[in-house]
Image: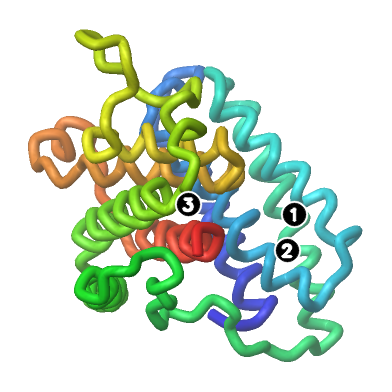
Amino acid sequence: MDGPGEHLDQSISEVDRLRKNLKRSTSKQVKSREEKNISKSTALAWFNGHLNHIRRVVGDEDCQSINWYYHELLSYADKDTTRLKYDSCLKELRKCLSSLRKTVVDAGIPSLNPSSSDTPPEFSTLIGDVKMQGILSERWKECVICIDGGAYLSATVMMGGLLETMLLARFNQEPNKERVFSSSQAPIDKKTGKAMPLNSWTLKNYLNVAHELKWISRSTKDVGEVLRDYRNYVHPYKQASHGVRLDNNDARIFWELTKEIARQLL
């Protein structure tokens, strides 16, 4: 997927998939975390992935309506919004995406080389340990192998591990640790009343503090939280009880956004 047409096709497919998922339930409102996560990941895939490619060939004004509807999806996911409202938004969003795709195709805009490579980044800018750099590069490559091989849950679990390691390294790199531990989002040890040591933090803690320190964007933090929730389905009983099944689309959305987080940190 390397040209604007392909990215618009993928966006339309993601919107159709979200509509289909939301129609499975007969409840009036969307309340489950799983459904809200799918909605968030669909919108964030646009802002952190597809949009960057499409902006290279069309003007910002061409994407205004599309951006507005995706922002609506993000706002819907922060509350218990009705399914009717979701469906209306998704219908209009699909029309806008299809219209832009027709414009791109009719104009004969060629495909461009992808700007989001699967090649491991240069981890040396974040981690001095050569051995750890090698391990992260291998994990990066294994994520790609897992996605291409259909091992989507395995890929998602590994992405979470990569994010935790990169975030921890970024915190260790910070010369003024007081900024880190005095953050309002830093986890507190109930016994001592002080911030817990970094190696005791969870991925959620890392993401919240990194966002407060302005190392990562709000949308990046949201992506990390969605990925964190999906990673927990490594436990078979939890996956079975929630009826969740990760597919190629989920994994590729998470992978594009994982690479975006890596770019922000590195």
How are the residues colored?
A: rainbow
For numbered disc 1, what is the local secondary structure? helix
Is 218 on the left or on the right of 57, as rendered? left
Q: What is the number of the mark on residue 121?
A: none
Nearest the eye: 199 or 222: 199
- Residue at image position (35%, 65%) is 127
Amino acid type shown at disc 1: Lys
For numbered disc 2, what is the local secondary structure? helix
- The spot of residue 155 in percent (x, y) is 25, 63
Q: CA distance from mark 2 to mark 3?
A: 15 Å
Q: Is residue 11 positioned above or below 32 on the image?
A: below
- Residue at image position (53%, 65%) is 263
For numbered disc 3, what is the local secondary structure? helix
Task: Find out whether the residues at labels 1 and 3 contact each other: C-beta distance under 8 Å.
Answer: no
Is 90 on the left or on the right of 59, as rendered? left
- The spot of residue 129 in percent (x, y) is 26, 69
Q: Is residue 211 positioned above or below 45 on the image?
A: above
Amino acid type shown at disc 2: Ser
Can you identify the residue that label 1 sits on? 95
The answer to whether one can see residue 67 in this image is yes
Q: Residues within 10 Å of mark 1 (few under 14, many from 20)?
A: few
* Tally of numbered discs: 3
Nearest the eye: 232 or 193: 193
Q: Quadrant of residue 34?
A: top left
Q: Is residue 107 positioned above or below 237 on the image?
A: below
Q: CA distance from mark 1 to mark 2?
A: 5 Å
Task: Find out whether the residues at labels 1 and 2 contact each other: C-beta distance under 8 Å.
Answer: yes
Q: What is the number of the mark on residue 98?
A: 2
Is 2 on the left or on the right of 54, as rendered? left
Amino acid type shown at disc 3: Arg
Can you identify the residue that label 3 sits on? 17
- The spot of residue 224 in percent (x, y) is 43, 45
